[in-house]
Amino acid sequence: MSPSLGTILVVDDEPQIHRFLTPALTAANYVPLRAERGDEALRLAASRAPDAILLDLGLPDMDGQQVLLKLREFTAIPIIILSARDREAEKIQALDAGADDYVEKPFALGELLARIRTALRHHLRQDNAEKPFSSGPLTIDPILHKVTLDGADLPLTKREHTLLLLLARNRGRVLTHRQILTAIWGPAHTEDVAYLRVYIGQLRRKLGSQASTLIITEPGIGYRLKDSE
């Protein structure tokens, strides 16, 4: 038997979600935990210390956003939101509040498992954030402030480099417009989405034909840098 890859707490009040995910997570070598209410999720998160949490926003006893905020008071583990397609504003709110990612319902199992792997990798490598890393043909060395594309140096302005490095440190994870603008331009610029789009456009032009597969737009929400397995 393969060793466990970690414990995943699934917080959802839909029985069919648990019937689907419990055997799927087990087959993928995770140990699933089940919670159907917010209070139960908080208790299990504190007592069982799971490695990641899948959190539905529509819970019967408390709002999922409230559960997220309470979780972030005592744990930094990856939290992936399970959301309905028509709740874009809730996705943005959850990501700004500390969620690591979101998966839309109905979701494909393969995509969900990939998002879990990415979130767990990102959590584990945070201590090594300054080491060189790659995403496909793109390589970034944070210490040397050097970026190469297919082995050739990529000339970037200071702001472009800062933006690309922020995406790279969170590669595979969606960052909202507000998160990016706050991190790079400060809290006074959280609404300057058009300004951000200009810099994303500049980066994409310099990345050329690779841009569409490296910098992925999450419509109405933000951006993510592709994470290479």
Image (tube, rainbow, N blue to C red):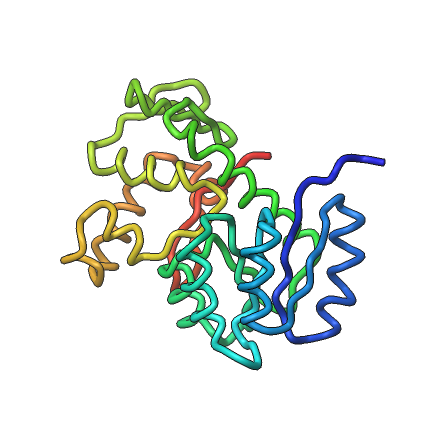
Who is closer to the viewer here, 195 or 167?
Answer: 167
Residue 116 in picture, x, y percent from top left: 60, 48
Residue 82 in picture, x, y percent from top left: 57, 65
Residue furthest left as drawn: 188
Residue 218 in picture, x, y percent from top left: 44, 57
Who is closer to the viewer here, 144 or 119?
Answer: 119
Residue furthest right as drawn: 1
Q: Residue at x 73, y 74 (%)?
A: 15
Who is closer to the viewer here, 84 or 14?
Answer: 14
Query: In which quadrant of the rendered image does the N terminus lie?
Result: top right
Who is closer to the viewer here, 62 or 154?
Answer: 62
- Kindly indicate the quadrant of the structure image that contains residue 155: top left
Q: Residue at x 56, y 57 (%)?
A: 45
* 149 with respect to 178 (left or right): right
Q: Is residue 60 above or below residue 128?
A: below
* 83 with respect to 152 (left or right): right
